Image (cartoon, grey):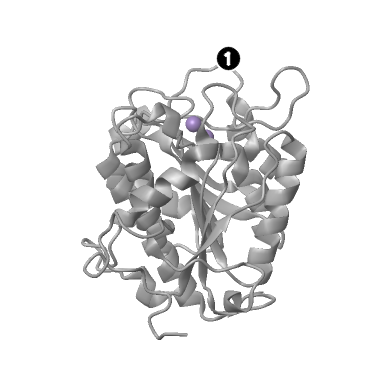
Amino acid sequence: MPKDFFTPVTGTTLPRYAGIATLMRLPQVDPQGELMQQVDIGLIGVPWDGGTTNRPGARHGPRQVRDASTMVRNVHRASRINPFELCNCADLGDTPVNPVDLMDSLARITAFYRTVHRAGVAPLSVGGDHLVSLPILRAIASDGPVGMVHFDAHTDTWNRYFGDSLYTHGTPFRRAIEEGLLDPRRVVQIGIRGALYNDSENDWGEQQGIRVIDIDEFCAMGVDAVIAEARRVVGEQPAYLSFDVDALDPVYAPGTGTPEIGGLTTLQAQQLIRGLRGLNLIGGDVVEVSPPFDPSGNTALVAATLLFEILCVLAESVARRGPATPAGHAP
Ligand code: MN
Ligand code: MN
């Protein structure tokens, strides 16, 4: 295996538009194969939108983000982090899904992430609708509840849809708290602004202890104070980062299932993620990219770039924890 096997293909030798598009031009590694032992961070697509209640299409997100992610270079300009020097990163491909069966899809996605987790690999995923965060958490938070920094226009802690349907992209974090995967007192939600079905439906999350930062509070506090508050809430224990692109204003990310005006700018989102440097991150995702509603391709570019922002802070966390072991991450 060449020494630079885990280094992304550079645009100085192969043009960025050429070659087979893997996430960030990384090597593709089979999660069942021997090379997996050398991977620290796995980039993963979840091509599934069976939890969508409105505009579909997020199942096409991973392929489009792979294409857009060929623009990613190695070194972050602001932080000077080179995540590919800190960690061995690889594209682990797409998870298995069943596009005609929701519960079977959740089971297949969880099984895939169990393999990843058992190999000691931290996952960084691209969805897929937001329900995919639930099967991911079922696999990687199986050792006890984790904290979460959650960017979204919606809390995604609603309860039921269409009678007794418990599993939609509006419910993943309610289910995750009920299942003991998330510690609600270590969850912060940023950018919330979507209108409600009734004036008490959002109370549940706050009653559990979630720190909800509505977009108006975000604007009043400013980026630095919100970063400080997020760090205070999440603390030093393991935490997940979930980014729904509808947290952004639709002028930046129109290609999504449930757009809401009055959202974050892309620069604010970048600054917020950079400010999470030093947290004990165990994984992350960018979800709800819907290419059929993204005629300019900008939403996929935004998602690919945010994925790189998250990768930089995640790589520092993974490197700080030290070499992974097959049984899980070293302390
Ligand atoms: Mn969401
Ligand atoms: Mn949302």
Is 157 left, or right, of 64 in this rendering?
right
Q: How many other residues sit within 10 Å of disc 1, few (<14), some (14-19) or many (≥20)?
A: few
The answer to whether one can see residue 330 in this image is no
The answer to whether one can see residue 325 in this image is yes
Residue 57, placed above or below residue 39: above
> Considering depth in this image, is 146 or 301 the residue closer to the camera?
301
Residue 235 is situated, as x and y percent measured from the top left of the image, at: 50, 58
Q: Residue at x 61, y 72 (%)?
A: 120
In the figure, residue 176 lies in which quadrant?
Answer: top right
Residue 200 is situated, as x and y percent measured from the top left of the image, at: 60, 19
Which residue is the extreme one toward the front? 19
Q: Residue at x 29, y 41 (%)?
A: 266
In the figure, residue 118 lies in which quadrant?
Answer: bottom right
Residue 108 is situated, as x and y percent measured from the top left of the image, at: 72, 50
Q: Which residue is mark 1?
A: 197
**On the rendered image, what quadrant is the C terminus found in?**
bottom right
Residue 121 is situated, as x and y percent measured from the top left of the image, at: 58, 69
Is 267 left, or right, of 112 in this rendering?
left
Secondary element type, mark 1: loop
> Considering depth in this image, is 144 or 185 the residue closer to the camera?
144
Q: Residue at x 43, y 57 (%)?
A: 23
Q: Residue at x 47, y 85 (%)?
A: 1
Q: Amino acid at mark 1?
A: Tyr
> Considering depth in this image, is 96 or 51 the residue closer to the camera?
96
> Considering depth in this image, is 4 or 320 the residue closer to the camera?
4
